[in-house]
């Protein structure tokens, strides 16, 4: 009697787990985003990203007219980001956030972009949530596509 009761418990448990699994599959993450993304929507999302990459590319290469239009002063030395970081080299977005000795703090990529604007470029720090910051970030990430994520690596 005792043995068969234990046997039943052992048998029903996996069944319950299985049933919950099926329910999770049916109702689960799918309900969070019911509508499948259409190819047209996907194209629109990609276009939105690439538009930011292009703006960031121009800012990174020192487009003064665009910087003025966006109300940012990224440099006063005549140096553009791309002169020290051609093709966004050595920007290492995949390593952030990390402890940054030059700033003596745990820093994000946006903190580091601002550090370069203020220090080597002698420009004016930009708002971390500004359009210019997002565009610079988009360009830097896009340029480093395929890099392995190693957050915290110094
Ligand atoms: C005069 C050369 C120079 C210019 C111009 C310059 N940087 Fe830098 N940048 C550096 C140096 C040097 C470092 C390394 C600083 C350190 O590690 O403390 C660096 C580091 C960085 C990093 C972090 C890299 C890492 O692995 O920690 C980012 C991101 C970055 N720069 C973005 C920019 C952006 C965006 C601009 C333009 C607004 C810019 N830089 C302009 C010299 C420059």
Image (tube, grey):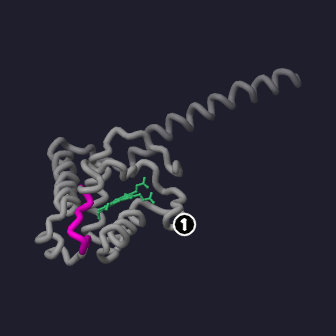
Residue 56 horizontal/vertical position (percent): 22, 59
* Farthest residue, direction left: 65
Q: Dot 1: within a 10 Å radius of its alpha carbon, few (fewer than 14), some, or many (20 or more) residues?
A: few
Residue 4 screen position, x and y as percent: 82, 21
Report the front residue among 37 and 43. Answer: 43
- Is residue 75 a member of the stretch shown in magenta? yes
Magenta residues (range): 74-82
The residue at the point 15 percent across, 76 percent down is: 68
Is 39 contained in the magenta span?
no
**Relative depth, front residue between 92 and 130:** 92
Quadrant occupied by the N terminus: top right
What residue sits right under mark 1 in the picture?
105
What residue sits 23% from the left and 62% below the top? 80
Residue at far front of view: 77
The number of discs equals: 1
Q: Quadrant of residue 127?
A: bottom left
Instruction: Answer above or below: position of 20 versus 45.
Output: above
Report the magenta stretch's main SS: loop
| Image position of 109 (left or right of 8) | left
Question: Foreground: 31 or 74?
Answer: 74
Q: Residue visible at 39% across and 44% down?
A: 30
Q: Is residue 31 left or right of residue 106?
A: left
Residue lying at 13% horizontally and 69% vertically, measured from the top left: 66
Q: Position of residue 2 (x, y in %)?
A: 88, 25
Q: Judge whether 154 appears above or below 102 on screen.
A: above
Q: Secondary structure at mark 1?
A: strand
């Amino acid at each position: 009697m005792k043995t068969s009761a234990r046997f039943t418990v052992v048998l029903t448990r996996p069944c319950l787990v299985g049933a919950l699994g099926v329910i999770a599959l049916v109702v689960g993450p799918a309900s969070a985003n019911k509508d499948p993304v259409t190819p047209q929507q996907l194209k629109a999302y990609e276009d939105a990203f690439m538009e930011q990459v292009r703006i960031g590319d121009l800012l990174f290469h020192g487009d003064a007219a665009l910087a003025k239009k966006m109300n940012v002063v990224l440099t006063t030395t005549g140096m553009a980001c791309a002169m020290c970081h051609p093709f966004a080299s050595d920007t290492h977005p995949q390593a952030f956030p990390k402890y940054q000795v030059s700033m003596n703090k745990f820093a994000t990529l946006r903190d580091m972009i601002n550090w370069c604007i203020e220090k080597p470029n002698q420009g004016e720090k930009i708002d971390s949530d500004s359009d210019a910051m997002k565009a610079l970030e988009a360009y830097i990430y896009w340029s480093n596509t395929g890099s392995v994520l190693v957050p915290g690596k110094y």
